[in-house]
Image: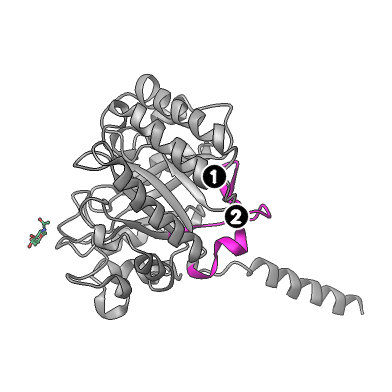
Amino acid sequence: MKSLLLCCLVILSTLINNSISKDAALETVSKHGKLAVQGTQLVDQSGQALQLKGMSLFWSVWMPQYWTPATIKSAHEGCHSNIVRAAMAVEYDGYLTDPSGQMQMVETVIEAAIANDIYVIADWHDWHGEQHLEQAKGFFDQVSKKYGGYPNLIIYETFNEPLDIDWSSVVKPYHQEIIKVIRANDPDNLILLGSPHYDQELDQVLADPITGQTNIMYTLHFYPVDTKQWLRDRIQNVINNGIPIFISEYGTCAGTGNGTIDAAETALWYQWLDQNQLSYVNWAISDKDESASVAIAGTPDTMICQDAYLSESGRIVVPQNKK
Ligand SMILES: *[C@@H]1O[C@H](CO)[C@@H](O)[C@H](O)[C@H]1NC(C)=O
């Protein structure tokens, strides 16, 4: 009897442990609810570690044809994502000159993510955020007012990729201003923060992290042709010292978005990401003639991530989202 009980307990605990599928498409908002950061780990409403895996849209101003509800449905079901990133352009005729048009595009994506039961990142997709603080505050105030009430859904990314500017004197104060604006409307949804040199200088963050805040993570971006073991070593040290990391963008190629695809180095990255239970979002849902695009030229939004329309990169990324 005792051994029977023990056996049942073992089976039960195995079932519980396996209740998170490797297929991100099954790990939806309705299943996991509110996100939080515990230590360095992203966790769900029950405190269980959760990995988000998914796709970033391409710059809103250059790939508007994929900022549609059909694309978001495809991202979930076809690309096996439980997260999508709305990379809203700021410069290049983006938010700075057309705030209402850009906001409308972001809202379309957020509402499609709600309908498709997946998480969504509102991304201030800017390389010069420190020059656009007031506009960014306006954007995040609006988004957090409107969507902060969905306790389980919206993720804010305050500054896509700072360039070679100083963390402590420039980037950190910028984030602190934006955090203040968001937290006035939304006390606890996840906020993602960029760091200098395209989200790779996390050592500067480690030396001077933002304190007194909850549910914030720092973004790492990597492109395997340029960034290899040395960057994994750097970030592992940062994580081991208590800094929570979220990969809001990665590619399978170089940071230029084009050229060789490095499948072997990408596999090393995936192994490291999964070991550390990190979340990762692929760049990008695009059919542009460059290596980083997930789709071949002319792919309709309804066909994103369908086998016949996958690029070389897409054939690496989509299976990974199910692994
Ligand atoms: C990417 O590289 C390919 C092959 O060299 C080239 O044909 C294509 O035009 C490049 N794409 C862009 C956007 O430059």
Please name the residue shown 30% across and 34% down the image: 162
Task: Look at the picture and state if 40 lies above or below 27.
Answer: above
Q: Position of residue 236 (x, y in %)?
A: 45, 43
Amino acid marked by disc 2: Ala
Residue 40 within the magenta-colored segment of the rendering: yes
Amino acid marked by disc 1: Gly
The secondary structure type at the circle numbered 2 is: loop
Disc assigned to residue 148? 1
Q: Position of residue 81 (x, y in %)?
A: 43, 65
Density class for disc 2 (Cα within 10 Å; few <14, some 14-19, many ≥20) is some
Q: Nearer the viewer, mark 1 or mark 2?
A: 1
Residue toward you, 321 or 33 = 33
Please name the residue shown 21% across and 65% down the image: 287
Please name the residue shown 43% across and 68% down the image: 76
Q: Quadrant of residue 4?
A: bottom right
The secondary structure type at the circle numbered 1 is: loop
Residue toward you, 5 or 152 = 152
Q: How is the image coloured?
A: one colour
Q: Please report contact status of discs 1 and 2: CB closer than 8 Å, yes or no.
A: no
Give the side of residue 227 with respect to residue 82, left or right: left
- Looking at the image, the residue that sits furthest to the front is 100
Q: Quadrant of the N terminus?
A: bottom right
Name the residue carrying label 2: 49
Q: Which residues are magenta?
A: 25-53
